[in-house]
Image (tube, rainbow, N blue to C red):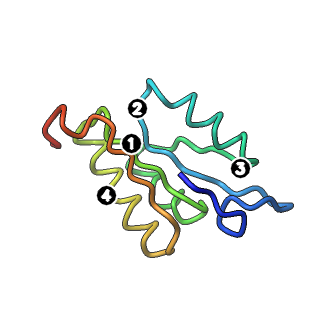
Amino acid sequence: MIIDSSGPWKKSEEKSHCNHITNFVTINDCANIVKAFGASPVMAHAREEVADMAGISSALVLNIGTLTSEIVDSMLLAGKSANNKRIPVVLDVCGARCHKIP
């Protein structure tokens, strides 16, 4: 992954938020990576909160390693909101060939 210093990760007085919808195996590592770049990690995954969170985030990361039907619904809502706001969406396809997407 290449991070452009002029993009959503650039250092500024106000921290950027990056929402991750990821699995519980990688959640801590993902948060620490975002913190290392000076941004604020958010791990909102509930269907009721993801669209609003994408609305205030600078980026959205979707990890499809361990899916449930609830998580897929949340990812779709968050992705649509992120696209409407025109923020980057990173799709982490880890485990994509290991299961059928619900």
Q: Earlier in the sequence, mark 1 or mark 3?
A: 3
Residue indicated by mark 4: 76
Name which residue type carries label 3: Ala
Q: Earlier in the sequence, mark 2 or mark 1?
A: 2
Q: Earlier in the sequence, mark 3 or mark 2?
A: 2
Name which residue type carries label 1: Asn
Residue 13 image-quadrant placement: bottom right
Q: Is residue 81 above or below residue 46?
A: below
Q: Earlier in the sequence, mark 4 or mark 2?
A: 2
Q: Depth-wise, is mark 4 or mark 1 nearer the camera?
A: 1
How far apart marks 1 and 3 lie (CA) works out to 19 Å
Q: Residue at x 43, y 67 (%)?
A: 81
Label 3: how many Cα within 10 Å (few below 14, some 14–19, many 20+): many
Q: Are marks 4 and 3 in contact (CB under 8 Å)?
A: no
Q: Depth-wise, is mark 4 or mark 2 nearer the camera?
A: 2
Name which residue type carries label 2: Asn
Q: Is residue 21 above or below residue 53?
A: above
Residue indicated by mark 3: 39
Name which residue type carries label 4: Leu
Residue indicated by mark 2: 23
Q: Are marks 3 and 2 in contact (CB under 8 Å)?
A: no
Q: Work out which quarter of the rendered image holds the C terminus and state it.
A: top left
Element at label 2:
loop
Residue indicated by mark 1: 63
